[in-house]
């Protein structure tokens, strides 16, 4: 636990700015008028109370993004693009972003639009407020300020989810940044499954993981609990009957944990499907593992950060999962925030296997996959080549190499939710498909080497990959080899943090220890 600072990051920045002229939002709450009369014009109220105007083009993408005054005229501010995302940062918010007190994604107009947070869609902005360590311990509850309604609290990481009324955003902003107990404010972002288009190749991928090797063939994941946090599962699907020992819906879906999307059923059966519907052809990697299903993504394939956080806690602390598969993630500009903090807080109890993302270029590893303790998975095809869509490292802030490992993620065949007969199985591609291969592999290794901790399982897996010459920022250590992992004796740490360096030019030396893990 961190020592209590005199002030949180937020107020420290606020106090530093008091000597400056802190601008008020250039908006009028009720009298905002846009000069754009087109039906496809949108407005966004930022957490600061400032207004942003944009137009939805014919291709569905946003254009004409600008910060505006109350009369609709432009106002000077910082607008920049990163990839396909446009950020609009009011001048009076920049210092808070620079000090990591405010999530830059709160100013990502494309993400706000894709999340349905434009003013026409909602009158509130969902956020997660991070408090100083110990603030929410025991019976303590987060203070609900004017203009905010409490969604729920997450004591483990001293955070709480709120909805900020947009018509009171400016006043709420001023109150929040002046509080000494607030460490940071994050967008309660909508997170998506990492899935891409379907394909036609129909050959099993499990044999390519080393699961049927001389040693691995003797294990099937029995006794290991694997949580799959996704879109739920088809509760009547034959391949998952008897495999699911606990399930819970965190999306408030009318159909509960039942999977109307298909993504969760596909990933769950890749981990531990018994292959009954195909006479064993499309069996999962660890067919005797116990599944814990947390529906954290809705039937549309997306879910709130707050719901995912609750699913993570439930899976590990209530259901005692040994491994947590998360084939999901969101774009990020820094590897921090509630999801990353939750991975770190729980990683001594469970191994988090998380998909890298499908953004295909450098420095696009998603969150929470960028978390240092996560076993982050890139995708490869049947020939061992990095999938074109697989996100490349390093982490968004450049401090972690990532991904850590790779596995099959191209044209993967697994259970189809609602499918029967000829439609019982479906072909998906994505790092979402690669992650459950690794989660299943981890279950087999955990069964075979029960003396190892979650971190040690991660290190063993990354120390025992198939030989290859792939780039570390594409496949990490390389392609998972379950059979070799069971007997691997020489173990090195997984991808290390690249570190944080100041400009003092002080010499730095690190000694790495390679251990001999006797089987």
Image: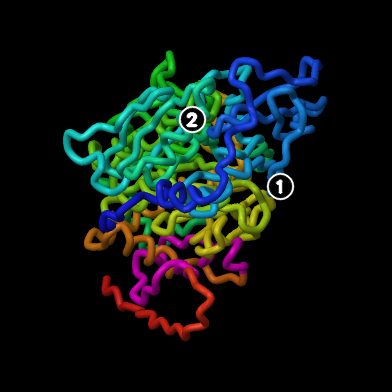
Quarter of the figure that contains the N terminus: bottom left
Give whichever of 236, 123 is nearer the camera.
Answer: 123
Quickly name the residue at label 2.
303
Q: Residues within 10 Å of mark 2 (few under 14, many from 20)?
A: many
Question: Which picture quadrant has residue 46?
Answer: top right
Quickly name the residue at label 1.
80
State the separation of the CA atoms marked 2 and 1.
Answer: 27 Å
Q: Is residue 31 left or right of residue 294?
A: right
The spot of residue 492 in percent (x, y) is: 39, 74
Residue 15 drawn in magenta: no
The spot of residue 458 in percent (x, y) is: 38, 61
Which SS type dominates the magenta stretch? loop
Q: Determine if residue 510 is in view.
A: yes
Label number found at residue 411: none
Give whichever of 191, 159 is nearer the camera.
Answer: 159
Report the mark closest to the observer, 2 or 1.
1
Q: Is residue 467 above or below residue 36?
A: below
Residue at image position (63%, 26%) is 27
Q: Is residue 71 above or below residue 210?
A: above
Residue at image position (42%, 54%) is 374
Question: Which picture quadrant has residue 136?
Answer: top left
Question: SS class of the residue under badge 1?
Answer: strand
Residue 478 drawn in magenta: yes
Q: How many marks?
A: 2
Q: Residues within 10 Å of mark 1 (few under 14, many from 20)?
A: few
Q: Is residue 14 left or right of residue 457?
A: right
User: How is the model colour-coded?
Assistant: rainbow
The spot of residue 227 in percent (x, y) is: 35, 40
The spot of residue 5 in percent (x, y) is: 30, 55
Question: Which picture quadrant has residue 331?
Answer: top right
Of the image marks 2 and 1, the number of the one nearer the N terminus:
1
Question: SS class of the residue under badge 2?
Answer: strand
């Amino acid at each position: 636990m961190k020592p209590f600072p005199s002030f949180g990051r937020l107020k420290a920045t606020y106090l530093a700015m008091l000597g400056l002229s802190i601008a008020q939002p250039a908006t009028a709450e009720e009298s905002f008028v846009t000069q754009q009369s087109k039906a496809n014009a949108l407005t966004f109220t930022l957490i600061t109370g400032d207004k942003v105007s944009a137009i939805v083009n014919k291709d569905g993408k946003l254009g004409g993004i600008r910060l505006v005054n109350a009369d609709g005229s432009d106002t000077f501010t910082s607008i920049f693009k990163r990839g396909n995302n446009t950020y609009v940062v009011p001048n009076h918010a920049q210092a808070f972003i620079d000090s990591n007190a405010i999530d830059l994604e709160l100013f990502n107009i494309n993400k706000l639009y894709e999340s349905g947070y434009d003013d026409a869609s909602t009158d509130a902005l969902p956020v997660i407020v991070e408090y100083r360590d110990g603030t929410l311990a025991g019976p303590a509850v987060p203070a609900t300020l004017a203009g905010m309604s409490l969604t729920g609290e997450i004591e483990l990481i001293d955070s709480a989810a709120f909805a900020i009324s947009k018509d009171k955003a400016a006043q709420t902003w001023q109150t929040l940044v002046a509080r000494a107990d607030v460490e940071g404010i994050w967008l309660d972002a909508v997170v998506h499954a990492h899935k891409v288009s379907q394909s036609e190749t129909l050959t099993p991928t499990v044999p390519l993981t080393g699961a049927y090797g001389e040693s691995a063939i003797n294990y099937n994941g029995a006794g290991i609990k694997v949580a799959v946090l996704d879109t739920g599962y088809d509760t009547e699907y034959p391949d998952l009957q008897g495999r699911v020992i606990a399930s819970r819906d965190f999306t408030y879906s009318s159909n509960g944990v039942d999977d109307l999307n298909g993504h969760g059923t596909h990933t769950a059966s890749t981990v531990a499907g018994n292959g009954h519907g195909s006479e064993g052809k499309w069996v999962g990697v660890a067919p005797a593992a116990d599944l814990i299903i947390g529906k954290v993504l809705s039937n549309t394939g997306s879910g709130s950060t707050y719901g995912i956080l609750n699913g993570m806690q439930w899976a590990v602390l209530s259901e005692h999962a040994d491994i947590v598969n998360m084939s999901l993630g969101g774009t990020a500009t820094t590897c921090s925030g509630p999801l990353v903090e939750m991975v770190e807080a729980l990683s001594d109890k469970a191994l988090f296997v998380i998909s890298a993302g499908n953004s295909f270029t450098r420095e696009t590893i998603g969150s929470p996959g960028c978390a240092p303790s996560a076993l982050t998975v890139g995708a490869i095809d049947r020939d061992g080549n990095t999938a074109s869509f697989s996100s490349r490292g390093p982490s968004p802030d450049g401090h972690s190499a990532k991904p850590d490992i790779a596995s099959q993620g191209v044209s993967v065949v697994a259970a189809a939710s609602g499918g029967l007969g000829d439609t019982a199985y479906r072909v998906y591609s994505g790092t979402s498909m690669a992650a459950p291969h690794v989660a299943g592999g981890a279950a087999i290794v955990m069964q075979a080497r029960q003396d190892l901790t979650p971190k040690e399982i991660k290190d063993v897996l990354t120390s025992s990959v198939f030989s290859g010459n792939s780039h570390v920022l594409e496949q990490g250590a390389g392609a998972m080899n379950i059979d070799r992992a069971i007997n691997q004796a020489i173990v090195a740490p997984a991808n290390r943090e690249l570190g944080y360096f100041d400009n003092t030019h002080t010499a730095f030396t690190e000694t790495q220890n390679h251990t001999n893990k006797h089987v």
